[in-house]
Amino acid sequence: MTNTAYPHSYYAASANPVPVRPRLQGDVETDVVIIGAGYTGLSSALFLLEQGFKVTVLEAAKVGFGASGRNGGQIVNSYSRDIDTIEKTVGPREAQLLGHMAFEGAQIIRDRVAKYQIQCDLKDGGVFAAITPKQMSHLESQKRLWERYGHTQLELMDQRRIREVVACDQYIGGLLDMSGGHIHPLNLALGEAAAVESLGGVIYEQSAATRIDRGASPMVHTAEGKVRAKFVIVAGNAYLGNLVPELAAKSMPCGTQVITTEPLSEELASTLLPQDYCVEDCNYLLDYYRLSADKRLIFGGGVVYGARDPANIEAIIRPKMLKAFPQLKDVKIDYAWTGNFLLTLSRLPQVGRLGDNIYYSQGCSGHGVTYTHLAGKVLAEALRGQAERFDAFAGLPHYPFPGGQLLRTPLTALGAWYYSLRDKLGF
Ligand SMILES: Cc1cc2nc3c(=O)[nH]c(=O)nc-3n(C[C@H](O)[C@H](O)[C@H](O)COP(=O)(O)OP(=O)(O)OC[C@H]3O[C@@H](n4cnc5c(N)ncnc54)[C@H](O)[C@@H]3O)c2cc1C
């Protein structure tokens, strides 16, 4: 039996103590079996346990092994496509529900951190940075749109003002969201897993689900055991493979890469990001960055469609970092890693039910830290029989990628190339 370890990331190197959890061996009965211990699975588990369900989580590797333990750590509100797209896609009632939910995930994270005293370096404040006038006018409409849904912790920044919060000359303005912010993502996942266990939930690691027997009383198999449950939640996202072929057919795993510098001097760190906000730019293929608690710059960007691991991550991401911050040219890179998120054609999440008792949520397409926390709440509501908010998500259309398994990667890369060319040309 092999043990799958965390990738060599800054997060794994600075993780809070990681307990060794058992593999599943033998037969178990539970109310809900959850496949995947990322934020979707852990958030679902916590909400369900708080409502009295008996919960078992199966994780193929370790808690937070997937995107949840590798991401940029940015708490970003709304979805990968904004509420205006949703308004054009569904009816007014559903758009209202989904619009208001777009700001709930950030609050769920803060509530979890406070309630379970999770040490994950939570900081308030996230910036969307505009490089072109078109991006700036998009941010102006975004502010109006979000305010229509009651989110008011927003400040538009002109060129002078954004220079006060980030020492990068590329930006002509931006939008500051004080309910955004950042966290140490793996420590958030580890804290949530500890909270699950404190409520009596059981997490098995190195226990990949290999088969689901569907039916009135579904059964999930692993190499050495099986779990019978009333409900199954599938939360494997970009790492799920082909366990559920219906889900694999309408989504595409994509890689994105992150580098982390050596610790910066206090002076350099406070010049780059004086208020310690996180930043993402508004390009289609966006750069995102922030400081760690020990004052390293954590910088991510780049997308590899189809999720092949690039040979030299530093060679791809460091030039992007130096374009934003030439002042870091002599700074050493200590860590570089890649992680997979799940892209959908609409870039909206896919939520639904297979038969009566197998639920899923996947495909937040790059922005998932807040959405996945909300997803756990919405899935738990549905299992309890309150499905109005679940149904609003489930009503979003799911499209297969054009070109099928063979051509979806080159076709999507071509589309992304077109959008990034538009960013470069400023239209
Ligand atoms: C590098 C990177 C940077 C990102 N940065 C940001 C950011 O700054 N802000 C933001 O909002 N979003 C960001 N995202 C996206 C965000 O991290 C994800 O949307 C979110 O973490 C997805 O959570 P999840 O629980 O659905 O999936 P994951 O965290 O990927 O968890 C899925 C888990 O399921 C397990 N699994 C899979 N198959 C099985 C199986 N058969 N049996 C048992 N277990 C299984 C996996 O091992 C994994 O642990 C980023 C993503 C990446 C990859």
Image: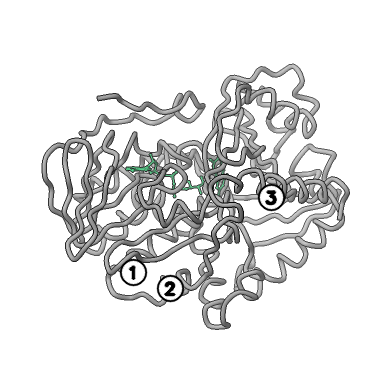
Q: Which mark is residue 381?
A: 1
Please give left or right for residue 127 compared with residue 13 in the image: right
**C-alpha separation, residue under disc 1 versus residue under disc 3:** 32 Å
Q: Secondary structure at mark 1?
A: helix
Q: Quadrant of the C terminus?
A: bottom right
Residue at image location 30% in from the left, 61% down from the top: 358
Contact (CB < 8 A) between labels 1 and 2? yes
Q: Residue at x 34, y 56 (%)?
A: 44
Which residue bears the numbered disc 3? 127
The quadrant where residue 170 appears: top right
Q: Secondary structure at mark 3?
A: strand
Is 28 placed left or right of 194 in the picture?
A: left
Specify whether 331 is left or right of 338: right
Give me the residue at 66% from left, 22% from top: 265
Disc 2: which residue: 389
Q: Nearer the viewer, residue 87 or 148?
A: 87
> Is label 2 in a helix, a strand or a loop?
helix
The tag on residue 301 is: none
Residue 326 in the image: state x and y as whole percent. Answer: 80, 27
